[in-house]
Amino acid sequence: MEGHSTKHVVTSLFVNLAITLAKGVAAFFTGSGAMLAETIHSAADCGNQGLLLVGIKRASRKPDASHPLGYGRALYFWSFVVALLLFTGGGVFSIYEGVHKLQHPEMPDNLLLAIGILVFSLVLEGGATLGNIRALHEKRGTTPFWTYLRKTTDSDLVVVFGENAAATLGLVLALVAILASHFLRDPRYDAIGTLAIGVVLVGVAVFLAVEVVSLLEGEAADPALEAAALELAGAEPAFKRVLQLLSVQQGPGEVVMALKVELASDATSDEVCRAINAFEGALRARHPELKWVFVEPDRPETAERSVAAKGGAVRAD
């Protein structure tokens, strides 16, 4: 987590502060439920981005005696909290407000003010979303965009993109709802727009929560990293074969890996030490995200009994 960028989070925070103020003014003067839902949503986004900054700060702490592998998973925890708040503070509230407006419909006022602020907010929020998309494109390489969203360990980047994308879509829905209510002279369209915004926010929050909780539970590292470990281990003359291989994503850009290897019968202790050090150095050079590597010599029968006793699944060549 050392050097993990906060630029995308800080940018989105300042954008949402400006948008929250603008939407709040519009909601007050128009009485629109969709505008109020969008105001609460943007205010919640500001709080969420503050929590992500807390998570990034905590995840950047150095390993210590109580956390020998560091604090990388702290960011996953705070990302999950953000998903919960987006669900409740944004989605559930918007749905509640939409139901209330359906039961007690009120025609929105000050149409030009509402449209102006929505367009202003859409320009800012759309720009922030495009910035998030560019950052994701830079990191994903040849991986398809939606596949990268599901597989990446940069939970803060995905959460901020999810929030901004949902906000952009929410602004479009709010604009359509207010225009429909005005030109069709039916305030229920404003309420329907509020409900639609709530559904969008709930859907995004559920997606984010599902993706982040997998990392929080201890997800395996990228298969490409494990394949590289097997390839490099197979090239070491002192290693006969890899008996077990386990990897865990400890945080964004932080992986823990443990291997049990069967040694060549004629390998000396000095050769084994040199082979382990050379293997770790080559693997880290290829995959800098690998922060901890543990290599243990073992016998095949001992390794198999160990796995059977623990009931675990093991990757090996």
Image (tube, rainbow, N blue to C red):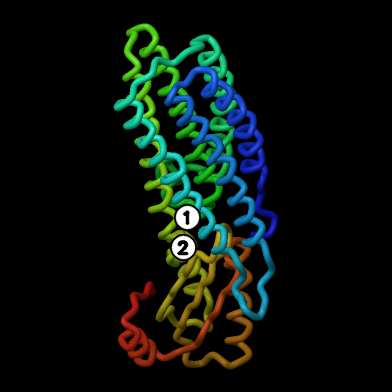
Toward the viewer: 302 or 124? 124
Position of 317 relative to 33 (above/below): below
Q: Residues within 10 Å of mark 2 (few under 14, many from 20)?
A: some
Give the CA distance from mark 2 to mark 1. Answer: 8 Å
Q: Is residue 227 visible?
A: no
Residue at left offset 43%, top offset 78%: 242
Foreground tag (2 vs 1): 1
Residue 33: percent from the left, percent from the top? 42, 26
Residue visible at 59% across and 41% down? 46
Residue designated by label 1: 80
Quarter-of-image position of residue 134: top right
The front one of 149 and 239 is 149
Residue type beneath disc 2: Leu
Q: Tell me if residue 128 comes above or below residue 122 in the rendering.
A: below
Report the quarter where the C terminus lies.
bottom left
Image spot of residue 312 (x, y percent): 34, 78
Q: Is residue 32 above or below residue 247?
A: above
Q: Can the viewer see residue 296?
A: yes
Residue 239 position within the rendered picture, expressed as x and y whole percent measured from the top left: 49, 82
In which quadrant of the rendered image does the N terminus lie? bottom right
Q: Quadrant of residue 314?
A: bottom left
Q: Are the residues tagged 2 and 1 within 8 Å (C-beta)?
A: yes
Q: Is disc 1 placed on a helix, strand or loop?
A: helix
